Image: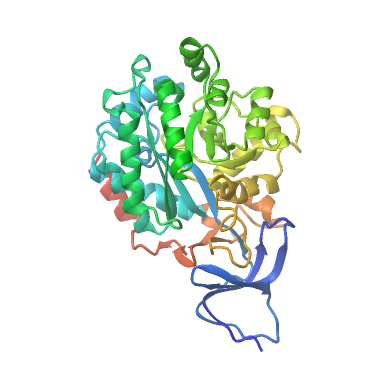
Amino acid sequence: MHMDEYDLLVENATICTLDEQNTVVTNGVMGVKDGAIALLETCRTDARYKAREVIDAHGMVALPGFIDTHTHCFQSLLKGLGADLPLIQWLNSSVQPFGVRVTHRQQELATLVTCLEALKCGCTTLCEFFYTNQDPELADVCIQTMRRTGIRSVLMRTFQDLGQEYDTPECYIEPVETAIAEVERLRASYDDGNMLSVWTGPDVTWATSRHGYEAILEYCLDAGVRYTMHLKETPEDDDMCRRHYGMGIVDLLEEIGFLTDRFLAVHCVNLTEREIATLAERGVSISHNPAANLYLGSGVAPIPACAAAGVNVCLGTDGAASNNATDMLDAMRLAAMVQKGVLRDATAMSARQVVRMATAGGARALGREGALGTLEVGKRADVVLFNPNKLKSMPMHDPLATVVYSSSPESIDTTIVDGKIVYQGGRFACGVVEAELADQVRAVL
C-alpha cells in the first residue's frame, strides 16, 4: 500500500506533462517533496496518499508553469504612455524620461505589479531585463521584491557603453568594466542557482561598442554566466552596425564569437534566412515577444521559419509599457494567431507548439531544461492549475487549445513555484491585496 508522505499533493487533475512524449495523465495525482515532483501517476484505488497539504484539482488541468523570458518590471507603471508611437519615439517620449528618474519605492511597486500579474496568469519564472543602472541599488530593490512574491526569477543586469546618437540617457552609459563589477556583486549577493539567477549582456545594438561585446563575452564565458540582448527588433540595429562596422549585427556577433548556446536573443523580428540558419547552427535561443512587436509596429518575427531551422524559441511579454500587461496567456494566443494570419496558414503555429515555447522552450533558453519546463518526477514543482469551468473557457475539448485560444487569468486557479502555493483562488501567499496595491501605485505617480 502506497504510504509515502508529501509536502503537497495535487489530486484528480488532467496532467499535461509536456514531456518528450507529450504524456497526458488523466485523473492524475502529483506528489511534491522538498520542492520537487516526487510522484506522478494515475490515481489508484489501492493507494493511500498522505500529504501535509492537498489540492483537489477535479476538472482542472495541471501544466508546467509558464516561463516569461523577457520583461522590464519598472514599465508596469507606464501602461498606455507613449501609445501609437514607433519604438525610438516611444522610448524617448515616455520610457526613458521615467526610467532615469525611477525611485526605489516606484521600482518596488512596479516589480510587485509585474510579478503578481505574472503569477495570476500562470507564470512561475520571470526574467527581468534590467537596464536602469543609474542607481545600482535599484537592481537590489527589484531582486528583493521578486523574492518577496515567491516567483522564480532571473535578473538580467545589462549595460550600455555608448548610444548618444540615439539619445540614450547619459546616466545609463557606463564602461563595460563597471557593468561586470556590478554583475559580480549581484551574483555574490543573490544568485542561488535555483530561485534567483543573475545574467548580463548588452542592452541594445545602438548603445553597445565592439569592445563592449568582446569584454562581456569574455567575462560570461570565463565565469559561466548566461547573457542576453535585444536583437534585430527594428532596422536601426543593422543601420548602426553597418555605419560603424561595415556589416550587419548578426555578422558582427558571429565574427566576435558572441553567438553561442548561452545567448538569448530577444525579438529577432528582422532576421534573414541566412541569419536564422546561423543562429540555429550556433545554438542561440530566441525570446519571441509578439505583443510588443505588434504594439510598436516593429513587425512579426519569422518564428515558424526559426523553429523549422532548429532554433529554440521561447516566449516573453516584454515590459508593460509596450504590452500593457504581463500576461503569458495573452502572449501565447498572439504567438499562435499572428503567424496564422501573416502566413495565411491555419497550421503555421499550433497550440501545442506555443505551449511548449512557453514552458520547455523557456527552460532550455535558461539552461534549466533538466529542472524546469515539463512535469516529470525529479524536476522542480513549478505547476499551474487551469480551471476551464469559466465562461471564456467552457466547454473544454482540447486542454492545450483551450489554454491558448480560450483562456484568461480567471481560469488560473493555482500557481505553484518550487512546490509552494504562491497564488490560489485570487489570493497571493505573500499577502499583497490588489486593491491596496492599486492605492499605493496611484500615490507614487
- Residue 159 in picture, x, y percent from top left: 37, 32
- Residue 53 in picture, x, y percent from top left: 49, 77
Residue 203 can be seen in this image: no
For the point 46% across and 48% down, the residue is 126
Colour scheme used in the picture?
rainbow
Q: How many marks?
A: 0
Relative to 262, does residue 241 appear above or below in the rendering?
A: above
For the point 58% across and 83% down, the residue is 4
Q: Residue furthest front?
A: 222
- Residue 412 in picture, x, y percent from top left: 53, 58
Q: Residue furthest bottom?
A: 1
136 relative position to 190: left or right? left
Q: Quadrant of residue 96?
A: top left
Residue 104 can be seen in this image: yes
For the point 29% across and 47% down, the residue is 140
Foreground residue among 31 and 296: 31
- Residue 387 in picture, x, y percent from top left: 59, 61
Relative to 203, does residue 248 appear above or below in the rendering?
A: above
Foreground residue among 295 and 391: 295
Foreground residue among 107 and 394: 107
For the point 53% across and 61% down, the residue is 382
409 relative position to 139: left or right? right
Relative to 134, does residue 329 appear above or below in the rendering?
A: below
Q: Quadrant of residue 347?
A: top right
Q: Looking at the figure, which quarter contains the C terminus?
A: top left
Q: Looking at the figure, which quarter contains the N terminus?
A: bottom right
Foreground residue among 327 and 125: 125
